[in-house]
Amino acid sequence: TVSIPQSVETIDGRAFACDFKLKKVSLPDKLKVLNNEVFYACEALQEIELGPNIEELGNYVFYQCKSLKKIVIPRKVKSMGDSVFSGCENLSLITLPPRDFEMGINVFANCKSLKKITLPQNMKYINTGTFWNCISLESVDIPKHITSIGDRASYRCSSLLTITFPEEITYIGSEAFYKCENLINITLPRISELKKGSKQGEVIPNCRIGADCFAGCIK
């Protein structure tokens, strides 16, 4: 167990990277920033509680923390960088704050144990590769104000069963739901432009579906 002193507000990049024996970390309440790769590849890390004043999580902060099972993102978070939880194969419970915040690409990529997640209700977009290869993911509640879903956002989410897109959607990226092999129900708003490999739809202004968006959805 590592206990960070209460006076610390920032932890610099790679501070504990590749510490293969680290299992538990106690962070101070004053902590505001975890910089890039702080706990990169801490494969034994099982337990960590982010303090209430955390505002920023840098790139790859918990990348390949394969023993981490749950995480609560504090309400004050303003941004999470690229691949923050990518490769956390046993992460099954993620609690996000109710308000929108900036998220990088591939944030939850390869979280193979994640089954369900609720996104902030005022969220405007889902970034590239957000749920890439989350093979256990069965349900994503897409908020009604989402306008854009990035390329490969739910690539190979092979357990995903149903998806409903909000009326405000203007773009669904290339391969966004590629190889979601058990997807049986898709509810789309009227759409204006379809690229190769996508399914047919009707016309409304300013809405587009990218190449191979639903390719390999065999059901």
Image (spheres, helix red, strand yellow):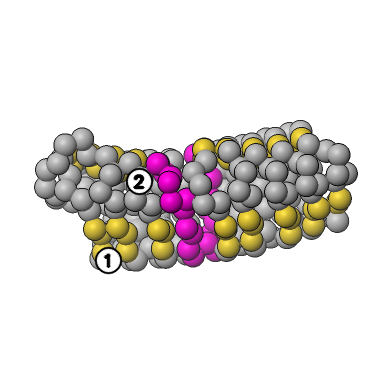
Residue at x 57% of width, y 48% of height: 86
Which residue is under mark 1?
A: 184
Q: Amino acid at mark 1?
A: Ile
Image quadrant holding the C terminus, namely: bottom left
Q: Position of residue 118 (x, y in %)?
A: 47, 58
For label 1, the crowd category at 10 Å Cα-Cα, with few meaning under 14, some 14 to 19 and many 20 or more, is few
Q: Are marks 2 and 1 in contact (CB under 8 Å)?
A: no
Name the foreground residue: 165 vs 194: 165
For label 2, the crowd category at 10 Å Cα-Cα, with few meaning under 14, some 14 to 19 and many 20 or more, is some
Q: Position of residue 65 (x, y in %)?
A: 67, 52
Q: Position of residue 171 (x, y in %)?
A: 29, 40
Q: Position of residue 1 (x, y in %)?
A: 86, 56
The answer, for residue 60, to whether it is visible in the render is: no
Magenta extent: 105-126
Residue 115: say if magenta: yes
SS at badge 1: loop
Relative to 118, is 152 on the left or the right?
Answer: left
Total tally of numbered discs in the picture: 2
Sequence order check: which comes first, mark 2 or mark 1?
2
Q: Amino acid at mark 2?
A: His
Relative to 14, is 166 on the left or the right?
Answer: left
Residue at x 88% of width, y 44% of height: 5
SS at badge 2: loop
Residue 132: say if magenta: no
Front tag of 2 and 1: 2
Residue at x 81% of width, y 53% of height: 26
Which of the 4 quarters of the picture holds residue 191?
top left
Which residue is under mark 2?
A: 145
Inter-mark Cα distance, 2 to 1: 24 Å
Which of the 4 quarters of the picture holds residue 67?
bottom right
